[in-house]
Image (cartoon, rainbow, N blue to C red):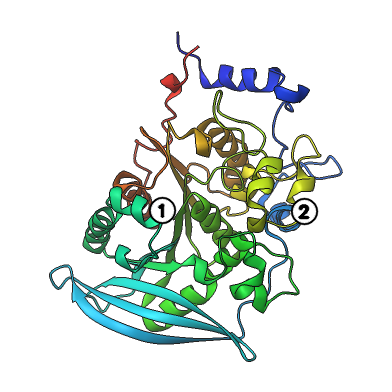
Amino acid sequence: MFVSFTLVLSLLVAVSLAGGEVLAEEPIDLLRRSDGSSVTSASEWSAQRSELLRLAGDYIYGSRPAPPDQTIAKVLSTRSILKGTAVETLLILNIRRGRQNVAVRVGVIRPVTTNACAVVIKNDRWLFDLSAMPRGRKRDQYTRERRDETFEQVCESAIKRGYAICKFVREDLAADAPNSRETGVLAMYSEHSWGALAAWAWGYTPVIDYLIKSQNIDPRRIIATGHSRGGKTALAAAIFDERIAISAPSASGSGGTGSMEYFTPGGRRQTCEEIFKNHSHWFSPRLKELGLSKPLQVDGHVLRALVAPRGIINTQGIDDTLANPVGTKMMFDASEPVFALLGAGGQTATHWRSGGHGQNFDDWTAVLDYADAYFAGSPLPKRFNNWPRSAYKE
């Protein structure tokens, strides 16, 4: 017998979990102020957003500096690719503060056109050549998964549609390690309490500045994506840089568009305490305090709503319990009243596919399909927001 999504949620909120913890009945209402009154109009949302943004900064991202004092791009190479339909540019973006410098590797694949074009910007561990990655477990994994072949297909598809693709190496901004606060821009701005996620997301701003100035990118059609921790990063980037028209996090889970409080039955529970224990360098030092309040003051629906009324699409495998499909669906539903209030009802999407943790060609296609519809003001494809309720058996 199949259990409906509503019943799954009722089981989640009614069952006592290990250690005697009982989940709250529902996530916090994003349109209810701290004094109990309700936000009833778009004009009232600004103050509510400011308060939610403050909480997200306190507990998730930490304090972030202003955009960098100076950035200088050094182009390393330019070549024609994809049978002459695109140009690949590799560069170093030097972020400077006084005498300090952080060098970020950036790559752009742009259609051969004089028109300003849309761009999808992905934070990643590598640019366009897997052999440039340091030897190790991740490079071996990506090689086995043929990520270079998938990415070539992605680029071909994007170029045909008129989109540019940009990638930057996020770990040039801050190491993905417990000592990350001693590296990159975290060390450059050591007076701030931010973590690696906020630093990686902050990197989108100078990258966007470069693209608009030097690559003829349309500032109204910018998309931020990333996978897993990179999905959390792409979401944060859109929260803080409103030039990003669409946030497209892939399998972002806890600390992203998933929940840190409600979880897929039988899946891995990544509560704020658990993810802080294993990845404290990603977050504000105050994340560990967040779990003390039930329901959580900040969860995935808060972060998702902070993008409103701009576009957002989640891509996720229904079998990817690491990224918490049920918790992601809950956060989608709980944030939708904000988009509706701001006149963006029906303009957000989640793309569910079979399979596990990854950002594959189908996920990329969903992002481009969503962007095509969003920028054209057209109805979203019917394949979006089709929650596969039959995924959970009683």
Residue furthest out toward the front: 136
Which residue does the image show at 69% across and 34% down from the upper left? 27
Mark in the foreground, 1 or 2:
1
User: Which secondary structure lies at badge 1?
Assistant: helix
Residue furthest out toward the left: 83
Which residue does the image show at 37% across and 68% down from the upper left? 166
Image quadrant occupied by the N terminus: top left
Query: Does residue 107 appear left or right of residue 83 in this picture?
Result: right
Identified by mark 2, the residue type is Arg
Question: Disc number at residue 286?
Answer: 2
Which residue does the image show at 72% across and 74% down from the upper left? 190
Query: Mark 1 — residue?
Result: 137
Identified by mark 1, the residue type is Arg
Tell me if mark 2 has few (under 14), some (14-19) or many (20+) residues whose alpha carbon lies within 10 angstroms of its own. Answer: some
State which quadrant residue 96 falls in: bottom right
Report the front residue among 218 and 300.
300
Q: CA distance from mark 1 to mark 2?
A: 31 Å
Which residue does the image show at 72% across and 19% down from the upper left? 16
Residue furthest out toward the right: 35
